[in-house]
């Protein structure tokens, strides 16, 4: 009998199924491993997230989630901000000032000035230059060297007034009156506000401040009585008749012999020294003027003279007389009087704006004993 052998067509279905099962088991094992790895990674990730959450909620872990204190903490830790609208941080509620021009900040109007910005106030002196007493300057003007004040050192202060105008005023130590003198700018400020004796000025420190030399200045009107100085004949020193050049060139020359009446003003020839004199007129206004040695025979009054001429309406041909002050502040403090040219012919009837006094002597020699007159 012949045996019929079938072709070898590979493993049987059962064997194939077994192979598939074996492959499936292997695949399942690999998938199981991968799933295990994924679950492990997920577990690690969850742990990291949990740790981050714990870090974020540091200080809250012992607080009940429904307690008001935790809700308050959550609210304070997450500020609510709107687009285009500055969000307010908790500490902003206690800040005294907020810059309204700063982007993203709320504008807050202050109806008062905190006490700490107020520095000092003082009565307005009737002067063309303001003198700030040393005690005030040393306390409130730290930019100035008050430990060893130097008369040659000049600092410029910036004042902002109530109309937001800026006033730049150079200031310098003035030893004779133990204070700091505003050299220029005060007369213009005084005219702008029509300051009178007994009015008050207040100096404040602005917040925010532009720089250490920046201050605020306020004015309060409080007019009072003015004590008129005595122009006595026995105190007369000398007088000069003004020329047109004394008006136009904003200076006046004094003869050396006349200046000898001012013992505190003596200067050597060829000296570049400049001294400050104080003259008080019949309206009790004090005029600070600088004087220098011009030549062998002359001294020249410069800064401050032009202000006096303009405010008092002094003209060529008028007489200006100088007197001793009965109660001078220092050795360079004197009285100054005016006799208008129209009153020379009738000195007993001074004109309506004249300053009163008696003179007994003149450097010109033509008006001895004439009345030096000026306004009320």
Image: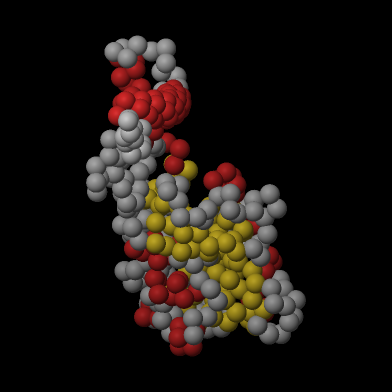
At x 64% / y 63%, what residue is drawn? 153
Nearer-the-camera pick, 357 or 160:
160
Nearer-the-camera pick, 33 or 176:
33
Is residue 31 among the parts visible in the rendering? no
| Scheme by which the image is coloured | secondary structure
Nearer-the-camera pick, 283 or 188:
188
Image quadrant in which the N terminus is located: top left
Is residue 292 among the parts visible in the rendering? yes
Image quadrant in which the C terminus is located: bottom left
Q: Position of residue 282 (x, y in %)?
A: 44, 62
Residue 69 vertical position relative to residue 307 in the rendered view, above or below: above
At x 42% / y 16%, what residue is drawn? 61
Residue 57 vertical position relative to residue 161 in the rendered view, above or below: above
Q: Is residue 343 left or right of residue 232?
A: left
Nearer-the-camera pick, 222 or 30:
30
Q: Position of residue 157 (x, y in %)?
A: 50, 59
Q: Is residue 270 left or right of residue 136?
A: right
């Amino acid at each position: 009998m012949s045996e019929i052998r079938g072709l070898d067509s590979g493993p049987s279905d059962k064997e194939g199924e077994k192979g598939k099962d074996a492959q499936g088991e292997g695949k399942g094992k690999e998938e199981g491993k991968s799933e295990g790895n994924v679950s492990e990674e997920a577990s690690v990730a969850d742990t990291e997230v949990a740790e981050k959450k714990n870090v974020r909620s540091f200080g809250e872990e012992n607080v009940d989630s429904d307690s008001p204190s935790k809700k308050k903490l959550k609210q304070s830790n997450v500020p609510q901000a709107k687009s285009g609208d500055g969000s307010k941080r908790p500490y902003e509620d206690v800040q005294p000032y907020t810059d309204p021009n700063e982007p993203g900040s709320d504008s807050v109007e202050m109806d008062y000035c905190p006490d700490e910005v107020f520095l000092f106030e003082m009565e307005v002196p009737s002067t063309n230059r303001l003198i700030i007493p040393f005690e005030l300057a040393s306390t409130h003007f730290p930019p100035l060297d008050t430990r060893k004040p130097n008369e040659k050192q000049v600092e410029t202060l910036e004042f902002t007034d109530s109309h937001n105008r800026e006033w730049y005023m150079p200031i310098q130590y003035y030893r004779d009156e133990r204070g700091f003198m505003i050299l220029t700018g005060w007369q213009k400020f005084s005219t702008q506000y029509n300051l009178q004796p007994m009015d008050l000025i207040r100096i404040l420190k602005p917040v925010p401040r532009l720089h250490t030399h920046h201050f605020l200045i306020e004015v309060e009107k409080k007019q009072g009585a003015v004590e008129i100085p005595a122009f006595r004949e026995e105190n007369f020193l000398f007088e000069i008749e003004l020329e047109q050049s004394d008006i136009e060139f904003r200076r006046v020359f004094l003869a050396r012999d006349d200046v000898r009446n001012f013992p505190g003003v003596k200067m050597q020839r060829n000296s570049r020294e400049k001294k400050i004199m104080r003259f008080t007129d019949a309206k009790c206004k004090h005029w600070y003027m600088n004087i220098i040695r011009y030549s062998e025979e002359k001294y020249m009054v410069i800064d401050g003279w032009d202000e006096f001429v303009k405010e008092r309406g002094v003209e060529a041909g008028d007489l200006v007389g100088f007197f001793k002050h009965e109660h001078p502040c220092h050795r360079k403090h004197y009285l100054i009087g005016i006799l208008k040219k129209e009153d020379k012919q009738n000195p007993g009837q001074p004109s309506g704006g004249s300053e009163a006094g008696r003179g007994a002597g003149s450097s010109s020699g033509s008006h001895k004993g004439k009345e030096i007159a000026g306004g009320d």
